Amino acid sequence: MTMNPKPSEHLLHALHAHQQQHRFISDQAICDIASRLNLPRAQVEAVTEFYSFFHRNPRGRFDILFSNCTSCGAIPLMNKLCEKLQVKAGETRADGLISIAETSCIGMCDHGASALVNSLTVTSLSEAMIEEMASLIEAETPVSEWPNSWFQIGNNIRKEGLLLSDSFEPGAALKAIAGRSSDEILDEITASGLKGRGGAGFATGLKWKFCRDAASDQRYVVCNADEGEPGTFKDRILLNSHADTLFEGMTICAQTIGATRGYLYLRGEYRYMLDALESTLQSRREAGLLGSDILASGHNFDIAIVVGAGAYICGEESALIESIEEKPGTPRIRPPFPVTSGLWGKPTVVNNVETLVAAARIALHGHQWFESSGTWQSKGSKLLSVSGDCARPGIYEYPFGITVQQVLDDAGAEDVQAVQIGGPAGRLIGTDHFTHHIAFEDLATGGSFMIFNHSRDLLEVVRNFTHFFAHESCGFCTPCRVGTTLLKNGLDKVCGGHGTAHDIDELKATAALVSRRSHCGLGMTAPNAIRDALKAFPHLFETRLLHQEMEPEFNLDASLQEARDLTHRDDAEAHL
Ligand SMILES: Cc1cc2nc3c(=O)[nH]c(=O)nc-3n(C[C@H](O)[C@H](O)[C@H](O)COP(=O)(O)O)c2cc1C
Ligand code: SF4
């Protein structure tokens, strides 16, 4: 007997299906879907308005979203296609054939310029492909008949370490923990020193223990596969080639905390993997690795997949939970925290994909195998998604403690001006910090490692990040909703050559306010790139000002410490 926890039909899935068929969500569709799913009409409308992949006005029969990321962005190619097809970006052509727009990073940074065509991912775009694409669209050739090679997405694994080099037999980790108590499994995970790989780095064993010990008749395991931080694509590789290990990690977590249901929240941009993931789940059910009485352990557990719809904020764990609950992805007021009150108010573990893959491997090989790699505060390995100006973009797995310079050397990066560690929410560092280490105690990263050489206008890069946050702010709290737009406008003014020293002071004041007063991690980290650039690269701003000079001030170490303090404060608050 299987016990698939899939709810009748998830609202996000119903809206996606409708959007695919009718190209938009009309008032009537909202009423119909609300009535079919037995949800309030206002909820369906709010969800439709919240997620950027749903539209209230008709999109074209060919709907193309070009990434605007600094690594997989394709804006010049988007403009070329717009020109060829006589349509403005952000609009639908009068005959309804085509609509073209920008979207935030789609996680294809190792593949160059990329876009979503009717939700399917096309990578390595070139001028020649754009010419051909325009002809295919004008001829109304269905996307299913477009060249197959356009839709191939390789893994680009450049360096394998603890996780990637290890082969995995489905069920092996579950068999390894057979007969062990919840305490014994917790001890193993805790002793390994595993910390969350989604960014904040909270101790995984402790998170599982908090959840297990919270009084409740039901608990949940949620895998965060939202991977929306620009420049991050390491979870994509794990989902593509290590899904069995991931699902096994979720199952082990469930057995440890006493959960019978789990959810994989997959970002909408990774929809192309959905069928393969569903089929892996089905194989596991058939092999007795999911469902009732898993491997005769007496434990029942199954996993459902919920696919997001283009909202970076849904990577934040409480927003993700709201999204699974078929609501707009607005971060919750905390406390209570997910480990005590998560999905439908029940204790919930939310872990990143890489964390759960590592947990399965630790269960299989034991804690010593894991903790023998890395540094004293950062055990094990880290998958880095390396992109930008280098000869060999792709996935690099290192023991924690590797220096930035070593990664740059391995990736074939030359003439490097700066590296953005941890995506736009992370840190922008210059050459004097390339001896620093990738580790929770030094340069922490969820996985993004973006390289910029001297051919780049670094201020344009920072401007891109600032636009990203203004676009992705969910609007729930004023400091972030208004502040990210003020930062965007201020930087636009400076980049446009109209700024003065006063505008720089305003940028600094606004950045401080947004990072200190915002409700969630998005706002708290949104000004990081501007602040780092102002400190480490003041000349970038100075040369654009109308007439005044700025006071140079630079202490990146103090700034990194401040960021770590903020992260730890957030983390401690989140779990105490
Ligand atoms: C704006 C924002 C976006 C986030 N996006 C992700 C994400 O895409 N994937 C992820 O695992 N964690 C993301 N996080 C962190 C999650 O809130 C959470 O800490 C993490 O999923 C916990 O898993 P871990 O303990 O395994 O790291 C994000 C946080 C914020 C504030
Ligand atoms: S900080 Fe930004 S993203 Fe977070 S709740 Fe406030 S408005 Fe929303």
Image: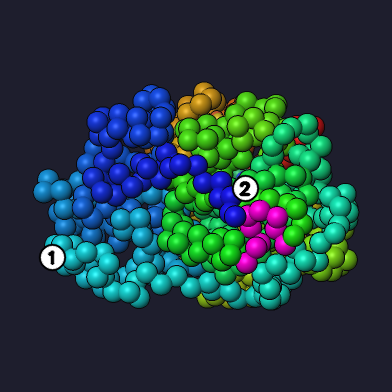
Residue 98 position, x and y percent, is 20, 53
Q: For residue 27: magenta?
A: no
Using a 10 Å C-alpha cutoff, classify the residue at mark 2 as few (fewer than 14 neighbours), some (14 to 19) or many (20 or more). Answer: many
In the image shown, does 427 or 538 lie closer to the viewer? 427
- Relative side of 433 to 36, left or right: right
Q: Which residues are magenta?
A: 287-295
Q: Would you place residue 353 above or below residue 127 in this image?
A: above
The residue furthest left is 95
Look at 52% across and 23% down and name the residue there: 478
- Relative side of 146 to 162, left or right: left
- Residue 404 shows in this picture: no
Look at 45% across and 70% down and name the residue there: 153
Q: Main secondary structure of the magenta part?
A: loop
> How is the structure coloured here?
rainbow
The answer to which image quadrant residue 62 occupies is: bottom left
Look at 58% across and 37% down and name the residue there: 321
Mark 1 sits near ligand 1, with its Cβ under 8 Å away: no
Q: For residue 291: magenta?
A: yes
Residue 571 position, x and y percent, is 74, 38
Residue type at mark 2 is: Gly
Q: Work out which quarter of the rendered image holds the N terminus and state it.
A: bottom right
- Relative side of 80 to 535, left or right: left
- Mark 2 or mark 1, which is nearer the start of the sequence? 1
Residue 461 position, x and y percent, is 48, 52
Using a 10 Å C-alpha cutoff, classify the residue at mark 1 as few (fewer than 14 neighbours), some (14 to 19) or many (20 or more). Answer: few
The answer to which image quadrant residue 411 occupies is: bottom right
Residue behind mark 2? 262
Residue behind mark 1? 139
Residue type at mark 1 is: Ala
Mark 2 sits near ligand 1, with its Cβ under 8 Å away: no
